[in-house]
Amino acid sequence: MKKRTAGIVLLILLLLLWEASARFGWVKSENWPTLVAVLEVTYRQLLSGELSLVLAASMARMIVGFVIGSLCGILLGLLLGTLRTLDGFLTPLVEAVRPIPVPAIIPPLILFLGIDDALKIFVVAFSVFFPMLVSTVGGVRNVDETLIRTARTLQTTQGSILRFVILPAALPSIMSGFRISLPLALITTVVAEMIAGSSGIGYVIVRAQYAMQPQEMYSAVLCLMVIGYLLNLLFLLFERRLIPWYHLSENA
Amino acid sequence: MLTRALAILLLCVCLPAGALAQTTKLRVSTNQNIDAAAFEAAKANGYFAEEGLEIDTTPVVGGAVGLPAVAAGQVQIAASNLITIVLGVKNGLPFKIIAAGDASSSAPPDLAGVAAKPESGIKSGKELEGKRLAVNTRNNIIWMFARAWVEATGGDLRKVSFIEVPFPQMVDAIRQGRADAAFIVEPFLSVGLKSKEIEVIGWPYATVLKNAPISQWVASKTYIDQNPQVIDKFVRAYNRGTDWINENNRNEKWVSLISGYTRIAPDIVRTAATPLFVKSMDVGQIEKSIELMRKHGLLQAGDRIDVPGLLYRTVASQK
Amino acid sequence: MRAFLRVDQISKSYIDGAGGAEAKILNSASLEIRESEFLAVIGPSGCGKSTFLQIIAGLMPPTSGRVLLCDKPISGPPAHMVYLFQQYNKSLFPWRTVRDNVAFPMQMRGAAAADIEQACRDYIRMVGLAGHENRYPWQLSGGMQQRVAIARALAAEPRILLLDEPLSAVDALTRMELQSLILEIWERQKLTILLVTHDVDEAVFMADRVATLTVSPARIDSIIETGIPRPRDPITTRERPDFLTFRRDLLNTLLNRQHAQIPST
């Protein structure tokens, strides 16, 4: 509790520093508005409903991409984690494709996926897929052999071992993959909208920059911060419900 | 099979509307900057609607996804700059320019200029040797004209380093010393000049190639061949937009139109320099641009560009 | 007497990863286990006891030889044979409560929910954990965790229980309690138990017969039948002269001191 208070105090200090630096001209730039101006714009746009529409469009893309990417990552991860032979085939490919940055793949992808939601959802799924795959494979590999042998001696079929032993045992690792890929999905959504814009929060940020409306840009950035924070909070709640045993045992 | 099914489906959807008026849907990708002014004017004044065109704008800001989207058939018409178009054609993408967009002016103030701090003492390409010159993207129009200007004003290109800085951050980059000069477009240039912290040291377009073709409207050859009358309608309406922009230059209607679609504040729009909005293209000017592309390595000696073939018949051309 | 479970000359070798040398763990070990008996196999640490037991459980294939259950060779873990691991903390499912751990084998064979509920209650009571149903394994002491593992093993309705040093990681007092508990269950459920241990005291106290494994490569060296009367008492049984004799002889064997001079009592 004390830690949190300190964190909030620091945040407020930084925000005050922002306001002062812009108000008293410590930072001179057309791109550096005062916090008050940013909040004013945010408030106005929230009232008009404009901002909510923009955010909803981005969130929808992000969530769809996130779900598709993480499902594919988990399924392939379970497969790769359990079938060692497949591993040799796929690991080099995965390692080669993994470091490709999203901005680099967008222009060629336009040829196949267009410039609309399919493209943006794909790149979000693409960016989420790899951390999910890696953490699932890691989770599956780290399942104690004793646990699997125990299940075998208790007459568990291979399919049931995967579902009732390997999957729950790998769940904490899969959840840590979620934790990495959730902010990644948000970032990728914004980047994709920045590059192949026309709607969403990323587009709003670039448009505001080119329209010399920095207060509008920072208002979008503030919203992203809040969304990122809320997503993490939501995730923690979800995690506590899904693997309560894990957190409790960590603290035990 | 699938295309036929889709066509039938489209027909069914369009029939009730079509019974009233023959409307064609067109998806157009534009950069929402000053270059799109004539297009936006045609849209706002209903010129497209009068031609029976329903325009769905896909605005793109600061990005270069318009041409790939045309190549993929995602949009039918896109705005792009001449250099990008020629590079696309060189790579075998069958683009044609259907409407001339805008060009740089013949005398300052122009739509873009090279700026530096007054106290830096930098006045030409010569003084930029050993210094950093900011451009928005390498291997594109701004970069090419910046290089040509450096050379034209006595600078050795090998001694000038070009760095990439997005237009909105260029003035800050000079202020903070991250760049010694920058080739800045409007409205960032005039807003920066207001602070008196930077000054214009050169007008590359006017120095290198007066009335340089800047931005054009492009469609794919396939679409043009299949829909020549749609292209005719589009260009007719577009050219009316160009006339409107030229007739209303800088009056209040003009300011509010541009401020409306760019979201740039009216005061800034009023003071910013604008390009020339044109209805025809000078083949000689295009050839000179291509010559510059060869000189600066954007085209190799063996790359043949059929300049007249770049222009569709809707673009009036001058020899 | 017909062998209920017969271990027929099983050998096990590993190829050493680094050197490529072949390491022989078991060298044609044979053993016959009678129905409903309690047989203990003792051997020093690292002699291949676990390997021996895992091969019998069908968790690991032998390099040569075979294991016959009711005259049928086994391949893979046979039904009604449950293996109880030494590392109870690694063999319990940490995401399942005590009750859900015990329910696991019944769920796997598709038992009805009501039956599972009843059976869980019974087994949990049998191992003395009533009232702890909803706790997670890591909330329990080591001894309690092994009780959960025993209850879960029973829920699989085994006829044969293979115990792999199940009590070596708990404290001495808990070990004695669990020894009595296992004996009680063995008698009540008419189980056949094969216990592998390095604890001579435990082997003599619990088993009808005690087999000795020699050191690497391991094979069954000798089998003795103790004939110590049942029920066995944790204190008085251990004071019996025959208990002490068996214990001393087996210790001598294990410590390789057959020829040492030890004053007889």
Image: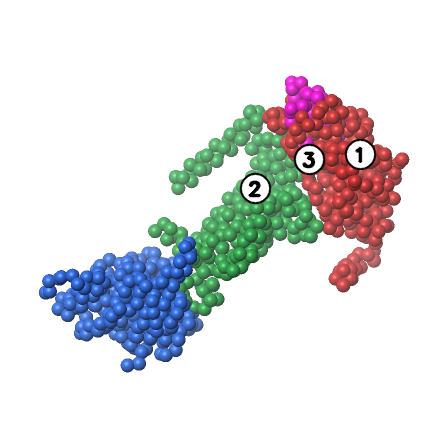
User: Do pointers 3 and 2 mark residues of a single chain?
Assistant: no
Quarter in which the N terminus of chain B is drawn: bottom right
- Which of discs 3 and 2 lies nearer the camera? The answer is 3
The chain letter of the green chain reads A
Residue B213 lies within the magenta run: no
Residue A231, compared with residue B171, is above or below; it is: below
- Where does the image place residue B233, in percent across and percent down from the top left? 85, 47
Q: Chain of mark 2?
A: A
* Residue, disc 2: A223
* Secondary structure of residue under mark 2: helix
Range covered by the magenta-colored residues? B109-135
Tell me the colour chain B is drawn in. red
Mark closest to the chain's N terminus, 3 or 1:
3
Tell me the colour chain C is drawn in. blue
Assess whether mark 2 and mark 3 are in contact (beta carbons under 8 angstroms).
no
- Where does the image place residue C244, in percent across and percent down from the top left? 15, 66
Name the residue rendered at 30%, 67% in the picture: C219
- Where does the image place residue B92, in percent across and percent down from the top left? 77, 47
Say what amino acid the circle numbered 1 marks: Glu
User: Do pointers 2 and 1 mark residues of a single chain?
Assistant: no
Residue A64, compared with residue B43, is above or below; it is: below
Name the residue rendered at 16%, 61% in the picture: C260
Q: How many marks?
A: 3
- How many C-alpha atoms fall within 10 Å of the one at disc 1: few (<14), some, or many (≥20)? few
* Residue, disc 1: B291
Say left or right for C129 vs B253: left
Q: CA distance from mark 3 to mark 1?
A: 18 Å
Instruction: Say if residue B234 shows up in the picture.
Output: yes
- Which of discs 2 and 1 lies nearer the camera? The answer is 1
Say left or right for C41 vs B309: left
- How many C-alpha atoms fall within 10 Å of the one at disc 3: few (<14), some, or many (≥20)? some
